[in-house]
Image (cartoon, coloured by chain):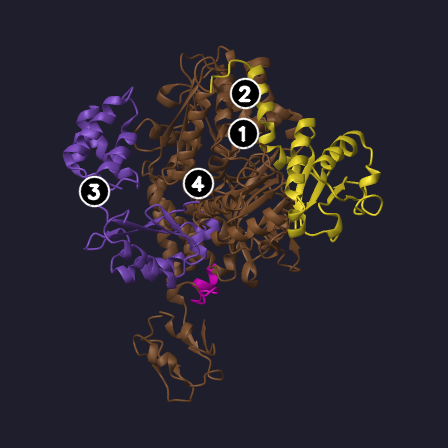
Amino acid sequence: MAKLKSMEELAKLRDDMKNRTEMRVTGTNPDRIVLSVGMATCGIAAGGRDTMKTLVEELEKHGINNVSVVATGCLGYCYAEPVVEVRFPDKGPILYGDVDVKRAREIVDQHLVKGILLDHAIIGKGAGRR
Amino acid sequence: MNRYRMHLMVCGGTGCRSSQSVQIVENLNQELKKAGMDQEVQVVTTGCFGFCEKGPIVKIYPDNIFYVEVKPTDAAEIVAEHVVKGRTVQRLVYKDPAGGKQIPASTDMPFYGQQIRIALRNCGLIDPENIDEYISVDGYQALGKALSTMTQQQVVDTLKKSGLRGRGGAGFPTGLKWQAALKQKSDKKYIVCNADEGDPGAFMDRSVLEGDPHSVIEAMAIAGYATGADEGIVYVRAEYPLAVKRLKIAIAQAEEYGLLGKEILGSKFSFRIRLSLGAGAFVCGEETALLNSVEGSRGEPRMKPPFPAEKGLFGKPTIINNVETFANVCPILLNGPEWFASIGTEKSKGTKVFALSGKINNVGLAEVPMGITLREIVENIGGGVRDGRTFKAVQIGGPSGGCLPKSLLDIPIDYESLSAAGAMMGSGGMIVMDDTDCMVNIAKYYLDFTVDESCGKCTPCRVGNKRLFEILERITDGKGTMKDLDDLEVLGGTIRDASLCQLGQTAPNPVLSTLKHFRDEYIAHIVDKRCPSGVCQNLIHYVVVADKCIGCTVCARNCPVSCISGERKTAHVIDQERCTKCGVCFSKCPVDAIVKE
Amino acid sequence: MASTTMTDEARYEELDRYIADLPDHKGSLIQVLHVAQDLFGYLPQDVQMHVARKLALPAAKVYGVVTFYSFFNTEPRGTYTVSVCLGTACFVRGSEEILKEFEKQLKVKSDQTTPDNLFTLTTIRCVGACGLAPVVMVNDRVYGRVTAKDVASIIDDCMAKGGSENG
């Protein structure tokens, strides 16, 4: 590590390091958005881990913070695994089914960034019927 | 850099380490590797969470789940269930003792509910051995701000405006201390951090040093800039090996990053920090004694004035602040003095960390706003007295402080209220006592401590406290007279007025405060020759309750001096003349027919 | 703890090296004594005299400092130093009973060493692990929530390891 020579270098280092601890600060924030990925045996078998990894990567790519991606147990929609629940602090949960890598990207791109729901992927509307 | 989707924070403070938290970290890492998730999930050894009663603690982000009393063998289940499948391990979740309800998030626990964490802001949040994590939570930004945008006087003014007062005991305004040092013209000035936390029952400084050493280092550098000092010394107890280790790591990292050393962050300011190990002398917590000790001499206090800010270490202007005081400095610079001053009471601003221990359910560290009542700390945060016993007193401020009774539980906690009640903020040790603790014996305990630790330089402390101790010993032996009570008060007053340093001046406090609030216990010892709490050996008698005794002979057979007589199946009798009060019969009796009186 | 494999000569050499590397002797006495005690295990008169000469201080000053601080010992210590915490938190949770039990089982009083040089029994005032009160420290290891019943097993733990600290 070269010595820091100025306030700007220190500020840059702080920004670079931010993601090391951001999750811990966000994790206790009551206003955070929570993405829950079904990770029971069936969720994992259907590819839940790749879904989860993609969500984490996409969020970072978009520089979105204040979102917690958590694993959760079986949500009961085994026919639609992998399942992802999106919960904004003051709104009801939206449940997406068949969330593969592509759809995970869409969730971040559309729902989180632009605020547009993916109607075709919501369980009970489009998802789980393949 | 690899972004982890989950962080497992494991407490690496002294308390949890002695309950095998190091092994927990190792096992978690192994299990993660086995599950192929060591690239996705990170295990972080962090500082003290404060909830020592329930340690070792493992906190999981981003889920915000708080596991208590974790054992190394639980690692497999945490990984298999929580990490892999997202199912909370219910049996490790904290249960509210009142309703038995499970509370998975620390933010919802009564222990944390009323806390505001400023000094402890990073304890449990970051890895204390990793400067990058400290920087990621705005570490060294306050130093940068001071160096690049503030004059020395502006830094001192900010401290003054914040109302921060010394957290080591007496509560002297920190800004004024800095101002006094800034005013001095000298070729050399020093910044000293007092980390000689010697009060029995206080462990907040240890937790800050172990959990967030950089916050102290950064604040010392800021103090150096503000007053024109170029050298800092941390005087730390040799009894705190982990704190010493983490400080050494932190100093080395700060030097590597150029945050200590020459021309910090491209400015003209240079500052270095070294450690000085204490060697086990309580009096070295007194600032002038501490200076003598850093100079390599016996830790005897000096006359004041001159104050250290004028003539301190090696005769040069010196600022001495305690660990917790320094830990408050950076947030004040970053968030502004108004923010800090908005917390607390009119004369006592900000928060104070208290170390709760003794007969209380939730032993641990709690940082609360000034002005909160004792009752809120003892009952809400501390969870009340343990084992269903009744509250008798809370001892605040260690050997310099006093014991406060139930009737004073509603006083607000600030420097002035506590002093008026006969206690002292001190370093913030708070020891709860119940009906089985004898207050005369507690006073004797503290005097024993002071006599042991008195440096011997001045007569009132060296001889006076010894006499106080002897009088207390007489009372607990059942040989006291009512005149002894007057003597205690007169002599205590003399020692308070005439001693050279704070140690001596405050040494009679435990006696005077118990005399004031628990006089009836003293009188019971003297007049009734009775120890109401059943503690003082010479005043207790073991008696068989005839109605309850089933004549099983267990007591008679176990008595080491064979002073219990009685036929099988008839009530037994203890010969008081020969009884040595060893208590064996009391603990062996299967039907609790033997009582202490 | 003193290294058991070093000769006294090697220890003096090491100590001299430390002193020679000091940038400045000013105020270094206590730090030098820490190093000396680490090397020798305790600070006998010879070592004190040696330090006095090396730092050009009166022997009386060195002796005065050694005897002032409880961390420094002028008598050799056992392989295991058992320190019972008598801090207030431990005291109100019954650490006196534990001290008595150690005295009984080790057959020594506080601040004494067993004849086989295995144990030194001492008391300390607060190690800051009050959450685990009452606390007993054996060398650097902390035992928490100790009861009189645990005393035998703590002693057995050490006995099992025998005379070698790392065994």
Q: Which amino acid does label 1 sit on?
A: Tyr
Q: Mark 1 points at which residue?
A: B134
Image-based side of B209 in relation to B478, left or right: right
Q: What element carries label 4?
A: helix
Colour chosen for chain C: purple
Q: The brown chain is which one?
A: B
Q: Is residue B178 above or below residue A99?
A: above
Residue at mark 2: chain: B
Q: Mark 4 points at which residue?
A: B496
In front: B134, or A107? A107
Determine contact: label 2, label 4, CB under 8 Å. Answer: no
Q: Does the magenta stretch include residue B137?
A: no
Query: In the rendered structure, which segment of residues is drawn in magenta?
Result: B522-534
| Prevalent SS, magenta region | loop
Q: Is mark 1 on a helix, strand or loop?
A: helix
Q: Is mark 2 on a helix, strand or loop?
A: helix
For this orientation, the residue located farthest to the front is A130
Q: Position of residue B168 (x, y in %)?
A: 49, 35
Q: Distance between the residues labelled 3 and 4?
A: 49 Å
In front: C8, or C91? C8
Q: Which amino acid does label 2 sit on?
A: Leu
In front: C79, or B357? C79
Q: Mark 2 points at which residue?
A: B143
